[in-house]
Image: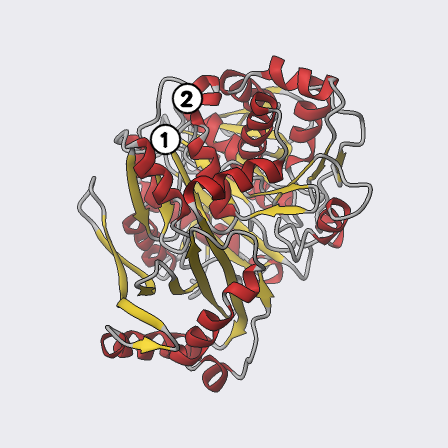
């Protein structure tokens, strides 16, 4: 039943910060998935006795690719696969299943927050035994293998039924189909006080959770409606669809417009939240009020003692370099460890494993803790609900009191999308060469205190990583430039702006950042080099 199939390499299978992401039609090319998976198996080496987790966010082509992976795993000697029922499993739930079962890794089929469908995007995330992203040195080896591959192994058998829970055997490999929600719910019940949250909803508290027709719909219905007692219909867009029902499953002010409009209307609920395609990102809203991911991380860190799992203390907190410095002030106040890392969740994993941090987050709506090795959207939502239940305060009250205590980082991200890769690379290279000349300059009243590439020296493994360029000002304001690694085509230049104030706490972010935005555009010569005079997406 095991066949060895001749193949030829593709030259575009280099993984980004969170796996391989390409257009669906690219992945659907003959042997594309097979080449990539065989390259992973070749890089791992001896697979006998090993166990892996498999599932996805239900996007277009998930079902076909999962069957390929199952048959290839069996042909390559894998002992066991743990597969989500009907092929579904969220990224955070998958990380938990890996850790709980002491699996050797997992394959989550998702392009995260990117659109789905035949004209959308597709992705494969490969996690190691930590339940988190693999190190760069491993992904580099996989890429080298993809460029040399000549054959792959696969079991020549019919597709297997993933609709029923239970165990079956194919080609000598055990396949266990599990409820992808059950273990995750049990983990959340061990972290949070569900009885307090039930009382919150029983008292009339209202919520709207937008699952964006993505994988966390069933998780959210089970937790918020069935267990915590929120009224039926609290979770909207709850059924995962291959094209996400035409939605762009990225929980931000642009793509979650329906939820944002509802929370800004007269019918708004007390609390609003959304998750992305694979469930690792989150957005938090109050009535007529938006909480930035940077503020959310800071507020979560400041309130850790309200959560049963963390009441005895946390090790520390880390943020990506692009994320605002808001959480750094909280870390100082609590005298806990604080780290700034490159973009990419894998950089947090060493810090978690070495017990340097408990919480971490990045500006792109990702927040998490060491309960798993991925960011976790529903975890963040439950944390916010727990703060509300414990304090009796609204989202806006909690956030404004935080600003009064620590000051406010006005912060926004400006994305310039669909750039020619060569143009984007040269823009960054030329800007890096220009940075030394900016040190000490005063531009429109903003004194530059430093201008340099961001370089991270990992305190655990000693590795060094350069990731983005940072211009810092004497008043605590910053500009961060980086190229995104999460797109499926072209390049996206992301420009992050931050302006810190201890006294001006109630202004419009765009107005506060107007002058710094002009400095950022001029310094990088964005209009001249890209033809874009404004960002495509502002969050």
When the figure is inspected, residue 493 is found, relative to residue 410, above or below; the finding is: below
* Residue 234, horizontal then vertical, whole percent: 76, 32
When the figure is inspected, residue 365 is found, relative to residue 416, above or below; the finding is: above
Q: CA distance from mark 1 to mark 2?
A: 9 Å
- Residue drawn at 45 percent across, 84 percent down: 529
* Residue 58, horizontal then vertical, whole percent: 65, 42
- Residue drawn at 77 percent across, 41 percent down: 268
The numbered dot on residue 172 is none
When the figure is inspected, residue 8 is found, relative to residue 264, above or below; the finding is: below
Evaluate whether residue 3 shows in this view: no
* Front residue of 346 and 111: 346
* Front residue of 282 and 68: 282
Locate residue 147 relative to residue 292 in the image: left or right.
left
- Residue drawn at 25 percent across, 31 percent down: 354
According to the picture, the residue beneath numbered tag 1 turns out to be: 358
Evaluate whether residue 142 shows in this view: yes
* Front residue of 249 and 338: 338
Residue at the extreme top of the image, as rendered: 195
* Front residue of 506 and 226: 506
According to the picture, the residue beneath numbered tag 2 turns out to be: 310
CB contact under 8 Å: marks 1 and 2: yes
Among the two numbered marks 1 and 2 on one chain, the one whose residue lies closer to the N terminus = 2
Locate residue 342 relative to residue 261 in the image: left or right.
left
Locate residue 398 relative to residue 520 in the image: left or right.
right
């Amino acid at each position: 039943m095991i066949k060895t199939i001749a193949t030829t390499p593709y030259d575009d299978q280099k993984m980004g910060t969170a796996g391989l992401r390409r257009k669906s039609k690219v992945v659907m090319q003959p042997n594309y998935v097979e080449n990539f998976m065989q390259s992973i198996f070749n890089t791992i080496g001896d697979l006998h006795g090993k166990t892996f987790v498999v599932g996805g966010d239900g996007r277009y082509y998930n079902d076909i690719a999962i069957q390929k992976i199952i048959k290839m795993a069996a042909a390559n000697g894998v002992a066991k696969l743990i597969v989500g029922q009907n092929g579904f499993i969220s990224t955070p739930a998958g990380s938990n299943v890996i850790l709980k079962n002491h699996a050797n890794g997992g394959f989550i089929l998702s392009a995260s927050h990117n659109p789905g469908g035949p004209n959308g995007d597709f992705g494969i995330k490969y996690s190691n035994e930590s339940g988190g992203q693999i190190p760069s040195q491993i992904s580099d080896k996989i890429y080298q293998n993809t460029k040399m591959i000549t054959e792959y192994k696969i079991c020549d058998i019919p597709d297997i039924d993933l609709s029923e829970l239970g165990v079956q055997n194919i080609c000598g490999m055990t396949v266990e189909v599990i409820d992808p929600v059950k273990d995750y719910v049990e983990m959340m019940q061990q972290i949070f006080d569900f009885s307090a949250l039930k009382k919150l909803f029983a008292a009339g508290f209202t919520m709207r959770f937008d699952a964006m027709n993505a994988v966390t719909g069933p998780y959210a219905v089970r937790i918020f409606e069935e267990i915590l007692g929120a009224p039926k219909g609290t979770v909207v867009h709850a059924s995962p669809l291959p094209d996400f029902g035409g939605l762009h499953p990225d929980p931000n002010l642009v793509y979650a417009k329906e939820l944002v409009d509802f929370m800004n209307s007269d019918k708004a609920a007390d609390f609003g939240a959304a998750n992305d395609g694979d469930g690792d990102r989150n957005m938090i809203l109050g009535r007529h009020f938006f909480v930035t991911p940077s503020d959310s991380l800071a507020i979560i860190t400041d309130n850790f003692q309200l959560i049963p799992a963390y009441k005895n203390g946390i090790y520390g907190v880390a943020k990506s370099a692009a994320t605002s410095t808001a959480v750094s002030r909280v870390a100082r106040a609590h005298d806990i460890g604080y780290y700034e890392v490159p973009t990419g969740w894998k950089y947090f994993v060493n810090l978690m494993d070495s017990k340097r941090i408990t919480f971490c987050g990045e500006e792109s709506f990702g927040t998490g803790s060491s309960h798993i090795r991925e960011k976790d959207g529903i975890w963040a939502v439950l944390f916010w609900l727990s703060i509300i239940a414990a304090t009796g305060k609204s989202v806006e009250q909690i956030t404004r009191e935080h600003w009064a205590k620590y000051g406010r980082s006005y912060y926004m991200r400006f994305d310039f999308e669909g750039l020619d890769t060569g143009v984007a690379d040269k823009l960054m290279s030329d800007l890096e060469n220009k940075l030394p000349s900016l040190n000490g300059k005063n531009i429109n009243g903003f004194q530059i205190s430093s201008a340099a590439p961001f370089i991270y020296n990992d305190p655990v493994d000693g590795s060094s990583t350069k990731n983005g360029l940072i211009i810092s000002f004497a008043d605590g304001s910053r500009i961060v430039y980086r190229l995104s690694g999460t797109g499926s085509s072209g390049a996206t230049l992301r420009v992050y702006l931050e302006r810190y104030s201890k006294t001006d706490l109630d202004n419009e972010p765009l107005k506060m950042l107007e002058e710094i935005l002009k400095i950022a555009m001029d310094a990088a010569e964005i209009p001249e080099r890209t033809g874009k005079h404004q960002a495509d997406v502002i969050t």
